[in-house]
Image (spheres, rainbow, N blue to C red):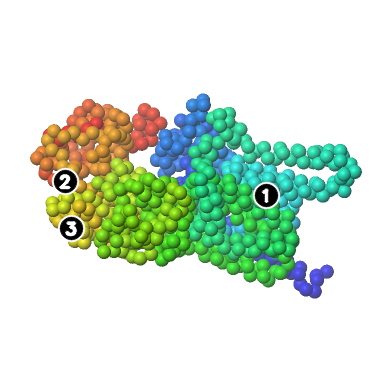
Amino acid sequence: MQPKDGSLDKNKLCGIISWVMIALFVVVSTFAVTRAPKLLYGDGYEYILLTQSFENHGTFDIRPDDVSETIATFPRYSGVTERAVTDFLIYDNSDDLRTYHFGAYSAIASPFVAISEKAGADPVYGFYILNIILWGLSLLSIKLLLKADEFKKLLLVLLLTVNPAWFYLAWIHSEIYLFSLIVIALVCRYNKWYAPAILVVSLAALQNVGVMPLAMFIGIEYIRSVWDDVKELWPSDKKGVAGKLAKRILPYGLLFVPAFIPYILNFIHFRRFSPMADSVMVSEDFGRRAVAYLFDPNMGLIVYAPVVFVVFVIMAVRAFIKREKLFETVMDLGALLIILIIIGHEKQINCDMFGIMRYNVWILPILIFHVVMFSGDKRLRNLILSVVSVAFTGFIVGYVMYSSNTFSYVEFAPWTKTLLNNAPWEYNPPTGIFYSRATGGERYDADTAVGYSDTNGNVHKILLSSNASISDSWFIVSPDGDIIDKSNYDDELNVMEYSPEYEYINISDNGYRLYQRLDRIDYVGGDVDVNPGAGIYNCVGGYAWASDDVYVALPGRAGCAVEYEFTFVPQFPVNIDIIANDKPVKHIDNGNTDRAVTCTFIVEESLDINYIHIESDVLKNNHEPNMSFDTSWQLRYLGEVTSYTTGDRIMLNSDMTDFRHSILTDVYYEPDGTWSGGTTLRFAVNTEGSDMIDLRINNVLGGSLDYQLVVNDREIEEGTLYAQSDLYIPVSDGLNVIEIRLPGATTPRDLGMSSDYRVLGIRMSYIDIL
């Protein structure tokens, strides 16, 4: 019979809404992944290689055929795959190539990748489909298995559906795998199904052992439940109690074994338990890093799930005061504390992520279950809190993912920028976070000053290591144009000691600028390790993204005119004005968006240090909301012109310096020469007193290649290039932009020579100025 209070109807309604939410998740997530950019994040290159190796031979060692088939299956990731094999993976004691991460996630993804490929779809969808299935199964486990009323099930489904895990749904990565298994384990735990709960956490730990404290405390809960069953017999039957405890508890130790399989295999292959831990785990400053997982404004739980986090803290305090649910609270706090201690030892706290820190994705369900399952019977209050939490989290996730303020792990969040601009002393993050987000590239130390500047070039916060504090590589300019005396900068600026090795300089006023004392800014050559000024976002691969306004400083010669060379790659039609020492010196109106541009400009009234301001207008109309950086143009090189004269030789090998910056397209450096990459080679060279240069070619892929030679946009000749030959190129005094078109360039793999997928043309040794 239906109760008069209508509770049965309410429970039915809650159950129906839960089903609707699960169905909506499947529909929305499927639509979302089809619209998501297909990019490889974090350690994704490991997972696609492991998927192929598991499919090929059922093991996780990376063989040459695995590499070539991975590149064929995921062609858009060919470059990073090849680079991973040479730079990121590791050889074991038997010289087998292996990844740092275990392949459980990849093994599960393998059939879905194969099905996607056979269906004619992009194979990356195999990983996305797996992520949707895993997340969906975790929601179904709540709806179908959890021993709780429908109202609490509904709150859990709401909070775990509208969740920061959305940041990682369209990732080839194990975050959703971990998130989903932790949810399923928590369902088992709250049902008091301790054995499957521990086993599921152990399976999750195959990808990250940091989750194991949860299994450990579930084990403690199980031991307590066993003790409750036999404690009446203690101490009258000590032997019998001990036997029952051993019989019921010791077998549970086998449930922890899966978590240690990767470590056992690592010891077999490497004679050490974790090559990854050896490379990334440090003890210094781990406390601040642990706290940052919770409170950092860029990636902390407090930003993306503030309601759940605050309610959890309030409930924990209340449990200690009123002694209600104290054991359960101690268990959850203990698990969270040890998890934070483990992951707080990771140096790479700011490693590749989107929005919330990746590890927080699988920490958050522990808090959500605690808040919902122990929240009491005040349904209206609980519903309001859950709706507010869902509304805020949904807004912040949507804002970060789809608004024009999209940002990634190498850029400060918009609200953090506001804090840094107005009260920089209030935000003193772990140094790895500041270094990475201020420089625009993952890094964890620097021998020079690294600063955060606003969009107008005003520096507001500077991080100094102990080496940087005594270095002459940087200087600060005050609003009146004077260089601040570094021996007394703490008298004028707000300096805070972060640790014995680091200090922060905080500047709330506008007009201050931080400069690096560089001879040149050479991103292609790799000479610039940190940003030389404001408005530049350093990237791996020989370039840096530039914003509307770039501020840099270069050495000059007082009283003499100085000519500088400027190389950039526009992403859109762009107008650029170059201003030196507050005087316009060059205007560039460029409508070509697919090739690099090299130009020169002269500073007639040079100072000892010339302050260069590069102003562009492209972002006013072409901001890309789905990009982490403002993609107006890429800075490749900026420095004093080097003119080559008769008799000079420019070496084109991996150790070259003066010329390397001028290669304007992708090239591959090898000890005995440089391969042109792609079907066009472009470079620029300044000559004086010469009318010819000789490009020495020591190898041609395939034996010969037809070419077209273009110098300063003028077609010179056509012909065929051979190994051990010379290409004579006419030049004139000044800047010469040279383009060698090689339409027949192909790959060694296509020629049947090797598994090398790179499009190669000619291998060059040197350039002689004749």
Give the mark toward the camera: 3 or 2: 3
Separation (CA) of disc 3 from disc 1? 65 Å
Q: Residue furthest right?
A: 236
In this view of the protein, can residue 255 be seen by the observer? yes
The residue closer to the viewer here, 577 or 761, is: 577
Quarter of the image where the C terminus is located: top left
Quarter of the image where the N terminus is located: bottom right
> Are the residues flagged by discs 3 and 2 in contact, CB closer than 8 Å?
no
Separation (CA) of disc 2 from disc 1? 66 Å
Q: Report the residue marked by disc 2.
A: 735
Q: Residue 132's x, y, as percent?
A: 57, 52
Indicate which disc residue 185 carries.
Answer: 1
Task: Please rate how many residues cluster around mark 2, counting C-alpha atoms within 10 Å: few if below 14, some from 14 to 19, many from 20.
Answer: many
Name the residue rendered at 18%, 37% in the picture: 718
Above or below, 152 against 127 in this view is below
Indicate which disc residue 585 carries.
Answer: 3
Name the residue rendered at 60%, 55% in the picture: 364
Name the residue rendered at 38%, 33% in the picture: 756
Q: Residue 592's x, y, as percent?
A: 25, 53
Label 3: which secondary element: strand
Q: Residue 206, located in which quarter of the rendered image? A: top right
> Are the residues flagged by discs 3 and 1 in contact, CB closer than 8 Å?
no
Q: Residue 343's x, y, as percent?
A: 56, 47
The residue closer to the viewer here, 282 or 78, is: 282
User: Is 758 positioned to the left or the right of 642 in the image?
Assistant: right
Closer to the chain start, of discs 3 and 1, is 1
Q: What type is the residue that disc 3 sits on?
A: Val
